[in-house]
Amino acid sequence: MFDKLTLIGIGLIGASLALKARQAGLARRIVAATRRQETADTANRLGLVDECGTDLAAACVDADLVIICTPVGACGEATRIIAPSLKPGAILSEVGSVKQAVIRDMRPHVPKGVHFVPAHPIAGTEHSGPEAGFPELFEGRWAIVTPLPDVDRAAADTVAEFWRRCGSMVEFMAPDWHDKVLGIVSHLPHLIAYTIVGTADDMAGERRSEVIKFAAGGFRDFTRIAASDPTMWRDVFLNNREAVLEILGRFQEDLFYLQRAIRWGEGDKLFELFSRTRAIRRALLDMKQA
Protein backbone atom coordinates (compact mmCIF):
# COMPACT_ATOMS: atom_id res chain seq x y z
CA MET A 1 0.00 0.00 0.00
CA PHE A 2 2.84 2.41 0.81
CA ASP A 3 6.41 2.97 -0.20
CA LYS A 4 7.34 4.20 3.30
CA LEU A 5 5.49 3.82 6.59
CA THR A 6 6.67 5.77 9.63
CA LEU A 7 5.67 5.02 13.20
CA ILE A 8 6.20 7.68 15.86
CA GLY A 9 6.39 5.65 19.05
CA ILE A 10 7.25 1.96 19.16
CA GLY A 11 5.44 0.55 22.19
CA LEU A 12 2.84 -2.22 22.13
CA ILE A 13 0.74 -0.69 19.33
CA GLY A 14 3.63 0.64 17.26
CA ALA A 15 5.61 -2.58 17.50
CA SER A 16 2.56 -4.69 16.63
CA LEU A 17 1.79 -2.45 13.65
CA ALA A 18 5.37 -2.74 12.42
CA LEU A 19 5.31 -6.53 12.66
CA LYS A 20 1.90 -6.83 10.97
CA ALA A 21 2.73 -4.35 8.21
CA ARG A 22 5.86 -6.31 7.38
CA GLN A 23 4.06 -9.66 7.58
CA ALA A 24 1.26 -8.45 5.29
CA GLY A 25 3.55 -6.56 2.92
CA LEU A 26 1.82 -3.22 3.51
CA ALA A 27 4.93 -1.05 3.02
CA ARG A 28 8.25 -1.41 1.21
CA ARG A 29 10.07 0.35 4.05
CA ILE A 30 9.05 0.68 7.69
CA VAL A 31 10.84 3.08 10.01
CA ALA A 32 10.13 4.30 13.51
CA ALA A 33 11.24 7.01 15.89
CA THR A 34 10.99 7.38 19.63
CA ARG A 35 12.27 9.89 22.17
CA ARG A 36 14.32 7.43 24.24
CA GLN A 37 17.52 5.96 22.81
CA GLU A 38 17.06 2.85 24.94
CA THR A 39 13.69 2.15 23.31
CA ALA A 40 15.13 2.74 19.84
CA ASP A 41 17.98 0.35 20.58
CA THR A 42 15.49 -2.31 21.69
CA ALA A 43 13.41 -1.89 18.53
CA ASN A 44 16.52 -2.23 16.37
CA ARG A 45 17.75 -5.24 18.32
CA LEU A 46 14.40 -6.98 17.88
CA GLY A 47 14.32 -6.13 14.18
CA LEU A 48 10.85 -4.60 14.45
CA VAL A 49 11.50 -2.04 11.71
CA ASP A 50 14.11 -1.29 9.06
CA GLU A 51 15.40 1.56 11.19
CA CYS A 52 14.51 3.20 14.49
CA GLY A 53 16.07 6.39 15.83
CA THR A 54 15.31 9.33 18.09
CA ASP A 55 14.92 12.05 15.43
CA LEU A 56 11.15 12.20 14.96
CA ALA A 57 11.24 14.66 12.08
CA ALA A 58 13.93 12.82 10.11
CA ALA A 59 11.96 9.58 10.30
CA CYS A 60 9.01 11.23 8.51
CA VAL A 61 10.90 12.46 5.44
CA ASP A 62 9.27 11.02 2.28
CA ALA A 63 6.81 8.93 4.33
CA ASP A 64 3.49 8.14 2.66
CA LEU A 65 1.77 7.21 5.93
CA VAL A 66 2.79 8.47 9.36
CA ILE A 67 1.07 7.01 12.42
CA ILE A 68 1.64 8.58 15.82
CA CYS A 69 1.63 5.80 18.43
CA THR A 70 2.45 7.83 21.55
CA PRO A 71 0.26 8.39 24.63
CA VAL A 72 -2.51 10.83 23.70
CA GLY A 73 -1.01 13.64 25.77
CA ALA A 74 2.09 13.64 23.55
CA CYS A 75 0.36 13.62 20.14
CA GLY A 76 0.22 17.39 19.73
CA GLU A 77 3.90 17.97 20.48
CA ALA A 78 4.91 15.06 18.24
CA THR A 79 2.90 16.57 15.39
CA ARG A 80 4.55 19.96 15.89
CA ILE A 81 7.99 18.36 15.67
CA ILE A 82 7.35 16.27 12.55
CA ALA A 83 5.20 18.81 10.65
CA PRO A 84 8.05 20.33 8.59
CA SER A 85 9.03 16.87 7.33
CA LEU A 86 5.58 15.77 6.15
CA LYS A 87 5.35 15.78 2.37
CA PRO A 88 2.25 17.02 0.49
CA GLY A 89 -0.20 14.20 -0.07
CA ALA A 90 1.04 12.20 2.91
CA ILE A 91 -1.47 10.74 5.35
CA LEU A 92 -1.06 11.49 9.06
CA SER A 93 -2.90 9.26 11.52
CA GLU A 94 -2.71 8.20 15.18
CA VAL A 95 -4.03 5.44 17.42
CA GLY A 96 -5.25 7.23 20.56
CA SER A 97 -8.14 6.09 22.74
CA VAL A 98 -9.39 9.70 22.87
CA LYS A 99 -10.29 11.65 19.76
CA GLN A 100 -11.58 15.18 20.43
CA ALA A 101 -8.60 16.25 22.56
CA VAL A 102 -6.10 14.62 20.18
CA ILE A 103 -7.66 16.36 17.18
CA ARG A 104 -7.61 19.65 19.10
CA ASP A 105 -3.89 19.24 19.86
CA MET A 106 -2.74 17.88 16.47
CA ARG A 107 -4.83 19.73 13.91
CA PRO A 108 -3.19 23.19 14.26
CA HIS A 109 0.19 21.68 13.35
CA VAL A 110 -0.89 19.64 10.31
CA PRO A 111 0.57 21.25 7.16
CA LYS A 112 -1.65 22.15 4.24
CA GLY A 113 -1.81 19.29 1.76
CA VAL A 114 -1.32 16.60 4.40
CA HIS A 115 -4.35 14.38 5.04
CA PHE A 116 -5.13 14.03 8.74
CA VAL A 117 -7.17 10.89 9.49
CA PRO A 118 -7.44 9.92 13.19
CA ALA A 119 -8.09 6.28 14.03
CA HIS A 120 -8.24 3.99 17.05
CA PRO A 121 -7.59 0.24 17.09
CA ILE A 122 -9.55 -1.24 19.99
CA ALA A 123 -6.88 -3.75 20.82
CA GLY A 124 -4.26 -4.05 23.50
CA THR A 125 -2.89 -5.97 26.44
CA GLU A 126 -1.68 -4.99 29.89
CA HIS A 127 1.91 -5.11 28.59
CA SER A 128 3.81 -2.16 27.14
CA GLY A 129 7.06 -1.43 25.34
CA PRO A 130 8.49 -2.70 22.04
CA GLU A 131 9.00 -6.21 23.43
CA ALA A 132 5.22 -6.53 23.92
CA GLY A 133 4.35 -6.26 20.23
CA PHE A 134 2.96 -9.16 18.20
CA PRO A 135 1.41 -9.13 14.70
CA GLU A 136 -1.88 -10.82 15.67
CA LEU A 137 -2.88 -8.03 18.08
CA PHE A 138 -5.43 -6.52 15.69
CA GLU A 139 -6.92 -9.75 14.32
CA GLY A 140 -10.72 -9.73 14.60
CA ARG A 141 -10.71 -6.48 16.61
CA TRP A 142 -12.43 -3.22 15.77
CA ALA A 143 -10.56 -0.23 14.40
CA ILE A 144 -12.53 3.02 14.49
CA VAL A 145 -11.71 5.68 11.90
CA THR A 146 -12.84 9.19 12.84
CA PRO A 147 -12.30 11.38 9.74
CA LEU A 148 -12.89 15.12 9.99
CA PRO A 149 -15.60 16.68 7.79
CA ASP A 150 -13.12 18.35 5.42
CA VAL A 151 -10.78 15.38 4.96
CA ASP A 152 -10.14 13.83 1.56
CA ARG A 153 -12.41 10.79 1.41
CA ALA A 154 -9.84 8.74 -0.47
CA ALA A 155 -7.36 9.27 2.37
CA ALA A 156 -9.93 8.14 4.94
CA ASP A 157 -10.70 5.05 2.86
CA THR A 158 -6.98 4.31 2.59
CA VAL A 159 -6.60 4.38 6.38
CA ALA A 160 -9.64 2.11 6.72
CA GLU A 161 -8.18 -0.33 4.19
CA PHE A 162 -4.84 -0.29 6.02
CA TRP A 163 -6.58 -1.42 9.22
CA ARG A 164 -8.56 -4.08 7.36
CA ARG A 165 -5.30 -5.50 6.03
CA CYS A 166 -4.00 -5.51 9.60
CA GLY A 167 -6.86 -7.89 10.39
CA SER A 168 -9.29 -5.41 11.94
CA MET A 169 -12.98 -4.82 11.37
CA VAL A 170 -13.47 -1.13 10.55
CA GLU A 171 -16.14 1.34 11.62
CA PHE A 172 -16.38 5.05 10.80
CA MET A 173 -17.48 7.25 13.70
CA ALA A 174 -17.69 10.92 14.67
CA PRO A 175 -14.96 11.93 17.16
CA ASP A 176 -17.36 13.08 19.91
CA TRP A 177 -19.41 9.90 19.72
CA HIS A 178 -16.22 7.82 19.77
CA ASP A 179 -15.20 9.44 23.05
CA LYS A 180 -18.56 8.71 24.68
CA VAL A 181 -18.65 5.09 23.50
CA LEU A 182 -15.06 4.41 24.57
CA GLY A 183 -15.73 6.14 27.86
CA ILE A 184 -18.28 3.41 28.61
CA VAL A 185 -16.63 0.31 27.17
CA SER A 186 -12.98 1.07 27.94
CA HIS A 187 -12.23 4.10 30.10
CA LEU A 188 -14.72 3.46 32.92
CA PRO A 189 -13.75 -0.24 33.27
CA HIS A 190 -10.10 0.77 33.61
CA LEU A 191 -10.98 3.41 36.19
CA ILE A 192 -12.98 0.85 38.19
CA ALA A 193 -10.15 -1.69 37.97
CA TYR A 194 -7.56 0.79 39.20
CA THR A 195 -9.89 1.79 42.06
CA ILE A 196 -10.77 -1.74 43.19
CA VAL A 197 -7.17 -2.92 43.20
CA GLY A 198 -6.12 0.25 45.04
CA THR A 199 -8.92 -0.16 47.60
CA ALA A 200 -7.97 -3.79 48.22
CA ASP A 201 -4.36 -2.77 48.73
CA ASP A 202 -5.35 0.02 51.15
CA MET A 203 -7.60 -2.28 53.18
CA ALA A 204 -5.30 -5.27 53.26
CA GLY A 205 -2.76 -3.89 55.71
CA GLU A 206 -1.03 -6.81 57.40
CA ARG A 207 -3.19 -9.21 55.41
CA ARG A 208 -1.89 -8.04 52.04
CA SER A 209 -0.17 -11.39 51.43
CA GLU A 210 -3.49 -13.20 51.96
CA VAL A 211 -5.24 -10.89 49.50
CA ILE A 212 -2.67 -11.73 46.86
CA LYS A 213 -2.54 -15.43 47.74
CA PHE A 214 -6.27 -16.04 47.63
CA ALA A 215 -7.17 -13.68 44.78
CA ALA A 216 -9.97 -15.32 42.79
CA GLY A 217 -10.63 -15.03 39.07
CA GLY A 218 -12.58 -11.78 39.26
CA PHE A 219 -9.91 -9.99 41.23
CA ARG A 220 -7.20 -11.36 38.94
CA ASP A 221 -9.07 -9.89 35.96
CA PHE A 222 -9.11 -6.50 37.66
CA THR A 223 -5.39 -6.68 38.41
CA ARG A 224 -4.68 -7.50 34.76
CA ILE A 225 -6.52 -4.37 33.61
CA ALA A 226 -4.97 -2.28 36.39
CA ALA A 227 -1.50 -3.34 35.20
CA SER A 228 -1.93 -1.26 32.02
CA ASP A 229 0.53 1.51 31.20
CA PRO A 230 0.01 4.31 33.78
CA THR A 231 1.22 7.10 31.48
CA MET A 232 -1.19 6.12 28.73
CA TRP A 233 -4.19 5.89 31.05
CA ARG A 234 -3.36 9.07 32.93
CA ASP A 235 -3.48 10.88 29.57
CA VAL A 236 -6.71 9.14 28.55
CA PHE A 237 -8.60 10.25 31.66
CA LEU A 238 -7.30 13.81 31.54
CA ASN A 239 -8.12 14.16 27.84
CA ASN A 240 -11.57 12.55 27.95
CA ARG A 241 -12.60 13.99 31.29
CA GLU A 242 -16.07 15.25 30.30
CA ALA A 243 -17.25 11.91 28.92
CA VAL A 244 -15.65 9.94 31.75
CA LEU A 245 -17.15 12.17 34.46
CA GLU A 246 -20.60 11.97 32.84
CA ILE A 247 -20.46 8.17 32.67
CA LEU A 248 -18.97 7.94 36.16
CA GLY A 249 -21.92 9.91 37.53
CA ARG A 250 -24.34 7.48 35.91
CA PHE A 251 -22.33 4.55 37.27
CA GLN A 252 -22.48 5.97 40.79
CA GLU A 253 -26.28 6.20 40.54
CA ASP A 254 -26.46 2.56 39.46
CA LEU A 255 -24.10 1.60 42.27
CA PHE A 256 -26.32 3.31 44.85
CA TYR A 257 -29.30 1.38 43.42
CA LEU A 258 -27.38 -1.88 43.86
CA GLN A 259 -26.28 -0.89 47.36
CA ARG A 260 -29.90 -0.27 48.36
CA ALA A 261 -31.03 -3.59 46.90
CA ILE A 262 -28.42 -5.44 48.95
CA ARG A 263 -29.23 -3.49 52.11
CA TRP A 264 -32.98 -4.21 51.88
CA GLY A 265 -32.67 -7.79 50.67
CA GLU A 266 -34.26 -7.08 47.29
CA GLY A 267 -33.08 -10.25 45.60
CA ASP A 268 -35.37 -9.79 42.60
CA LYS A 269 -33.56 -6.59 41.63
CA LEU A 270 -30.17 -8.25 41.99
CA PHE A 271 -31.30 -11.26 39.94
CA GLU A 272 -32.69 -9.04 37.17
CA LEU A 273 -29.45 -7.06 36.93
CA PHE A 274 -27.23 -10.14 36.96
CA SER A 275 -29.37 -11.85 34.30
CA ARG A 276 -29.22 -8.80 32.04
CA THR A 277 -25.45 -8.43 32.33
CA ARG A 278 -24.94 -12.16 31.77
CA ALA A 279 -26.72 -11.82 28.43
CA ILE A 280 -24.31 -9.03 27.43
CA ARG A 281 -21.36 -11.31 28.15
CA ARG A 282 -22.87 -14.02 25.96
CA ALA A 283 -23.37 -11.50 23.15
CA LEU A 284 -19.71 -10.52 23.34
CA LEU A 285 -18.69 -14.16 23.13
CA ASP A 286 -20.93 -14.65 20.08
CA MET A 287 -19.22 -11.69 18.38
CA LYS A 288 -15.79 -13.09 19.30
CA GLN A 289 -14.98 -9.90 21.24
CA ALA A 290 -14.31 -11.63 24.55
Image: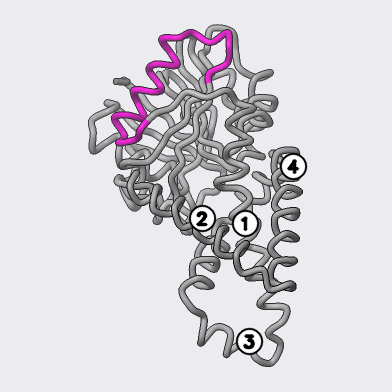
The local secondary structure at tag 2 comes to helix
Q: Closer to the N terminus: mark 4 or mark 3?
A: 3
Q: Quadrant of the N terminus?
A: top left
* Residue at the far bottom in the pictured view: 206
The residue lying at 48 percent from left, 13 percent from top is 87
Q: Which residue is mark 1?
A: 230
Gap between marks 4 and 3, in whole Å?
Answer: 33 Å
Q: Residues within 10 Å of mark 1 (few under 14, many from 20)?
A: few
Secondary element at image label 3? helix
- Residue 7 in the image: state x and y as whole percent: 45, 34
Vertical order, 202 against 157 (above or below): below
Of callouts 2 and 1, which one flags the residue occurring earlier in the amino acid sequence?
1
Mark nearer the viewer, 4 or 3: 4
Provide residue 31's location: percent of width, then percent of height: 39, 34
Q: Which residues are magenta?
A: 147-169
Instruction: Examine the rendered structure and indicate whether residue 117 appears above or below residue 70.
Output: above
Pointer 3 or 1: first along the chain: 3
The label on residue 246 is 4
| Residue with the mark numbered 3 | 208
**Closer to the N terminus: mark 4 or mark 1?**
1
Quarter occupied by residue 149: top right
- Of the pair 159 and 48, the residue shown nearer to us: 159
Query: Where does label 2 land, which residue?
Result: 277
